[in-house]
Image (cartoon, rainbow, N blue to C red):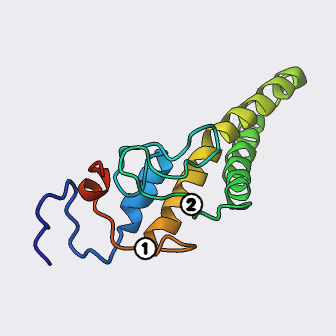
């Protein structure tokens, strides 16, 4: 394992590797995959061109349709399982309750998961140096220093 570089806020063992799991966790929390401080999104699903904290360029991402598909899979499985469980435990539940509860829960879960899944996908692309993220190894202190 290489010695941590002088002045780095987050020392990395090998400057060529970008930790995938840490990047995914940061992206899921809608934070910059490089520094973990800046926000990935400027608006609900609009990715910032660069991290406001460290300056890491984020405009290279190619999320396309993957986040909505993944959100549909996750939310669909959770809602479907819950619907079957409720029907099994409470078969006489009034139809108006189902008509009110399930669409509301589906919408809330979808709106919660969609930006998190997109942030994780952008971070995953950054960690694997895909689609233009293959630039020089990132240093959070060097990038954050004003020019």
Q: Secondary structure at mark 2?
A: helix
Determine the image quadrant of residue 16.
bottom left
Q: Position of residue 71 (x, y in %)?
A: 68, 51
Who's the residue at 36% across and 59% down the image?
22
Whether residue 110 sits left or right of residue 7 in the image: it is right
Q: Residue sitting at 69 percent across and 41 percent down?
A: 110
User: Hey, which residue is sitting farthest front in the picture?
Assistant: 147
Mark 1–mark 2 distance (CA, rounded to whole Å): 18 Å
Count of labels shown?
A: 2
Residue annotated with mark 1: 135
Mark 1 Cα-neighbour bin, 10 Å: few <14, some 14–19, many ≥20: few
Q: Residues within 10 Å of mark 2 (few under 14, many from 20)?
A: many
Residue 41 percent location from the top left of the image:
55, 43
Q: Out of 3 and 137, give the one closest to the viewer.
A: 137
Above or below residue 136? Residue 97 is: above
Which quadrant holds the N terminus? bottom left
Toward the viewer: 23 or 58?
58
Residue position marked by numbered label 2 in the rendering: 121
Earlier-in-chain disc, 1 versus 2: 2
């Amino acid at each position: 394992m290489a010695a941590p570089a002088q002045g780095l806020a987050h020392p990395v063992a090998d400057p060529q590797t970008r930790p995938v799991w840490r990047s995914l966790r940061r992206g899921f929390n809608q934070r910059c995959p490089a520094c973990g401080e800046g926000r990935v999104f400027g608006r609900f699903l609009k990715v910032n061109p660069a991290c406001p904290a460290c300056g890491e360029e984020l405009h290279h991402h190619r999320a396309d349709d993957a986040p909505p598909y993944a959100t549909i899979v996750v939310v669909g499985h959770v809602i479907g399982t819950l619907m079957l469980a409720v029907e099994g435990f409470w078969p006489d539940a009034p139809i108006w309750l189902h008509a009110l509860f399930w669409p509301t829960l589906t919408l809330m879960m979808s709106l919660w998961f969609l930006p998190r899944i997109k942030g994780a996908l952008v971070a995953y692309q950054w960690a694997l140096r895909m689609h233009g993220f293959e630039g020089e190894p990132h240093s959070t202190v060097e990038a954050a220093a004003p020019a």
